[in-house]
Amino acid sequence: MNHEKLSKRLKKVSDHVPFGAIVGDIGSDHAYLAVYLIQSGKCPFVVAGEVNQGPLASAKAHIRSNGLTDKISAKLGNGLEVLENENVNTVVIAGMGGPLIATILEEGKERLSLVERLILQPNVAADHIRRWLLENNWKLIDEEILEEDSHVYEILVAEKGSGLTPYDTEDLEKQLWLGPYLLKNKNTAFEKKWKRERQQIEKINQQLALSGKNELLKEKKQKLSQMMTWLEEEL
């Protein structure tokens, strides 16, 4: 059997899936991860969820071509709806924006009662997810940041527990933005992402300096100033 070859990003995501887990992959991207998890022997069953018929058909075709229709269930549904009547204990949501992932979690949180682990890979704005986890009693247990094809990705892993556990409350906002584990283990991907972000903030600051004065602009400038201070401390 030819095993599924994953991108570096999805391989890192798969590394955080516990052996023997029943996985729900929300927005499965042709079911690449699902097929890999079955073929590698890591998982006995995967639910691959898609919100639209086109991606669902692509996932089903890929599952069928690998002879795995008995081990991967491709389902149509909005977000965590596909977990209904499934014994999923690990949820993966990868390749979306942080705000969308947080919205999917919020709208489907009543379906997470059996879920023990969340593996979340936002393309942008991971702070939205960290804040949701904190507010909903999910403990962030690990983070990774990596670069692939000039894009920088973050991976967040959470289990049920006190959301505050990994954070220093004095630096809470800074850690929600930059990542408590990533701050302790800064690598080249971290530095590349935030140096690029710092340049963007500097540009916005220059534009705001030319704008008029009102309370909303003042708050925006203060927030950006705080972000710049944090980045100067860490880069």
Image: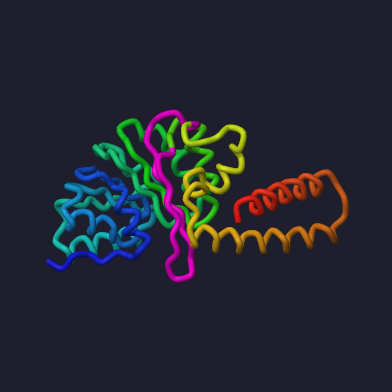
Instruction: Reply yes or no: does residue 162 show up in magenta.
Output: yes
Residue farthest left in this picture:
1
Residues in magenta?
Answer: 140-164
Residue 157, quarter of the rendered image: top left
Q: Where does the image place residue 139, in percent across and percent down from the top left?
A: 43, 35
Q: Where does the image place residue 137, in percent across and percent down from the top left?
A: 45, 30
Of residue 170 and residue 35, the one placed in the foreground of this image is 170
Of residue 103 and residue 116, the one placed in the foreground of this image is 116
Relative to 98, is 88 on the left or the right? Answer: left
Q: Where does the image place residue 164, in percent across and percent down from the top left?
A: 50, 31
Relative to 173, is 133 on the left or the right? Answer: left
Residue depicted at x 39% and y 50% = 93
Relative to 82, is 231 on the left or the right? Answer: right
Image quadrant containing the N terminus: bottom left
Residue farthest right in this picture:
213
Residue depicted at x 36% and y 35% = 112
Residue depicted at x 45% and y 56% = 145
Image quadrant containing the C terminus: bottom right
Of residue 107 and residue 227, the one placed in the foreground of this image is 227
With respect to residue 2, does 101 lie above or below? Answer: above
Of residue 4 and residue 173, the one placed in the foreground of this image is 173
Instruction: Reply yes or no: does residue 71 show up in magenta.
Output: no
Relative to 26, is 202 on the left or the right? Answer: right
Residue 116, quarter of the rendered image: top left
Residue depicted at x 21% and y 60% = 63
